[in-house]
Image (tube, rainbow, N blue to C red):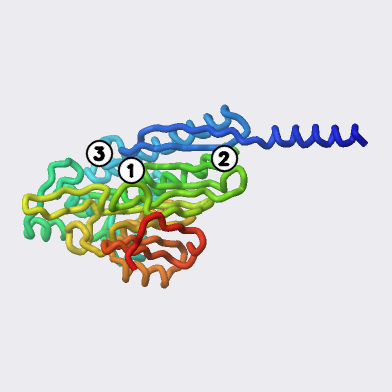
C-alpha cells in the first residue's frame, strides 16, 4: 500500500513539474510606443521564441501602417508614389476602416491626418488653426470617397486609431501559432490577453485614473482586448488657457469636447476595441450608450468629466471601483 502511495505521489510530482508554466517577458519599442509581451509556457526558450516572433510581426505592421516611414505602404499611398496594392493585411485594415466609418456614422475617420497635423499633434508645433483653414481641410476628409489609386486630392490616411489594436490581434495569432496558451500584452496601453492566468484565474487590469495617480477601477478579463482612449493622454494649452486634446471630432475638425474623460472598450477584437474607443469618446456618453444598446458586441466603461463611472451590463461582477465617484 505504501509503495502504491509513493508511486502515486511520484506521478503527481512529475505531472506538476510537466505542467509548471515558465513566465517569459520581453519589452521593445514599436509604433512610437513601449510594448511588453508576457507569456507562460513550458520553457523560457519557447517563451523567448514566441516573444521574438511577436516583435517581428509588429515591426512588419509598423512598416505597413506608418505615416512617417517613407518605405511604408501607407506613406506611399499618402504621397501618391508608385505602389502595387497587393498587401492583403493592408486591404484587411482598409476594409475594416470602411466598415467602422460607416458603422459609427463618421465618428471613426482615418482621413483626418491633414487636420491633426495642422493642429501640431504630429510635429509637436502646436497651434489653433483659423476657422477658414479648418473648413478648407475638412473638405478633404470624406473617407467614403477614399480610393487608393490614388487618393482624392489633399486626402491623407492615418490608421493610428486602429494600428495597435490590429497589432494586438495579429500578436495573439502569432502566440497561438507558437503554442502559447496564456499571455498578456501591453501595447502602449492597449491590453490584449490570451486565455487566463496559468492557474485558471482571470487577469486583473487597471483603468487609469484621469484625475490622479494609479487606477480608477480594476477589471477582470480573459481572452480579450481592453483599449482606453482619454483626453488626458496628449494635449496642449493655448495662450488663452484653453486645453486641446489629441482626440478629434471629425465633424468639426477640432479636438473633441464631449462629456467623456475616458472610455474603455472590452472586446474579443483588438482593432474593434481600438476603433470604438476613439469613436465613442467623440460621440459622448449618451450616444455611446445608445450605440452599445444597438450593437451589444462589446463592453464599455465610461469615466465622465463630472467624475461618474458608467459601465455596461456584461461587466457586472468583473469591475471594482478604486476611487470615489460622483453619484
Earlier along the polypeptide chain: callout 2 or callout 1? 1
Q: Residue at x 71, y 36 (%)?
A: 16
Q: Residue at x 51, y 62 (%)?
A: 317
Q: In the rendered image, which quarter contains the N terminus?
A: top right
Query: What SS does tag 2 mark?
Result: helix
Q: Residues within 10 Å of mark 2 (few under 14, many from 20)?
A: few
The correct choice, above or below, for 138 with respect to 18 in the image is: below
Give percent across and percent down for residue 307: 30, 62
Q: Are marks 2 and 3 in contact (CB under 8 Å)?
A: no
Look at the image and tell me whether residue 249 can be seen. yes
Q: Residue at x 59, y 33 (%)?
A: 22
Q: CA distance from mark 2 to mark 1?
A: 23 Å
Q: Which mark is residue 177?
A: 2
Q: CA distance from mark 2 to mark 3?
A: 31 Å
- Residue 135 as seen in the image, left or right of residue 43: left
Q: CA distance from mark 1 to mark 3?
A: 9 Å
Q: Which mark is residue 188?
A: none
Q: Are marks 1 and 3 in contact (CB under 8 Å)?
A: no
Give percent across and percent down for residue 159: 31, 49
* Residue with the mark numbered 3: 68
Q: Which mark is residue 65?
A: 1
- Residue 43 as seen in the image, left or right of residue 240: right
- Along the line of sight, which residue is nearer the eye, 267 or 15? 15
Q: Residues within 10 Å of mark 1 (few under 14, many from 20)?
A: many
* Residue, far front: 324
Query: What SS does tag 3 mark?
Result: loop
Quadrant of res 19 = top right
Give percent across and percent down for residue 314: 49, 65
Query: What SS does tag 1 mark?
Result: helix
- Residue 77 as seen in the image, left or right of residue 224: left
Amino acid at each position: 500500500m505504501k509503495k502504491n502511495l509513493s508511486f502515486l505521489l511520484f506521478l503527481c510530482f512529475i505531472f506538476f513539474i510537466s505542467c509548471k508554466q515558465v513566465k517569459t517577458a520581453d519589452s521593445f519599442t514599436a509604433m512610437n510606443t513601449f510594448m511588453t509581451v508576457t507569456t507562460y509556457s513550458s520553457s523560457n526558450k519557447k517563451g523567448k521564441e514566441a516573444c521574438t516572433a511577436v516583435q517581428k510581426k509588429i515591426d512588419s505592421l509598423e512598416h505597413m501602417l506608418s505615416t512617417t516611414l517613407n518605405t511604408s505602404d501607407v506613406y506611399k499611398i499618402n504621397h501618391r508614389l508608385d505602389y502595387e496594392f497587393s498587401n492583403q493585411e493592408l486591404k484587411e485594415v482598409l476594409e475594416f476602416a470602411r466598415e467602422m466609418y460607416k458603422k459609427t456614422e463618421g465618428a471613426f475617420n482615418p482621413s483626418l491626418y491633414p487636420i491633426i497635423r495642422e493642429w501640431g499633434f504630429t510635429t509637436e508645433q502646436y497651434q489653433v488653426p483659423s476657422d477658414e483653414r479648418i473648413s478648407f481641410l475638412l473638405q478633404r476628409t470624406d473617407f467614403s470617397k477614399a480610393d487608393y489609386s490614388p487618393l482624392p486630392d489633399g486626402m491623407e490616411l492615418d490608421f493610428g486609431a486602429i494600428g495597435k489594436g490590429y497589432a494586438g490581434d495579429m500578436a495573439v495569432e502569432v502566440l497561438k501559432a507558437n503554442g502559447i496558451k496564456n499571455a498578456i500584452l501591453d501595447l502602449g496601453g492597449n491590453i490584449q490577453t490570451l486565455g487566463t492566468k496559468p492557474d485558471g484565474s482571470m487577469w486583473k487590469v487597471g483603468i487609469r485614473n484621469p484625475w490622479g495617480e494609479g487606477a480608477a477601477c480594476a477589471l477582470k478579463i480573459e481572452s480579450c482586448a481592453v483599449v482606453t482612449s482619454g483626453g488626458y493622454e496628449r494635449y496642449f494649452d493655448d495662450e488663452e488657457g484653453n486645453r486641446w486634446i489629441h482626440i478629434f471630432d471629425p465633424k468639426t475638425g477640432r479636438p473633441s469636447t464631449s462629456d467623456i474623460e475616458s472610455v474603455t472598450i472590452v472586446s474579443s477584437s483588438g482593432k474593434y476595441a481600438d476603433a470604438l474607443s476613439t469613436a465613442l469618446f467623440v460621440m459622448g456618453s449618451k450616444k455611446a450608450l445608445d450605440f452599445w444598446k444597438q450593437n451589444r458586441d462589446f463592453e464599455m466603461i465610461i469615466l465622465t468629466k463630472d467624475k461618474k463611472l458608467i459601465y455596461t451590463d456584461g461587466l457586472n461582477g468583473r469591475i471594482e471601483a478604486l476611487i470615489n465617484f460622483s453619484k
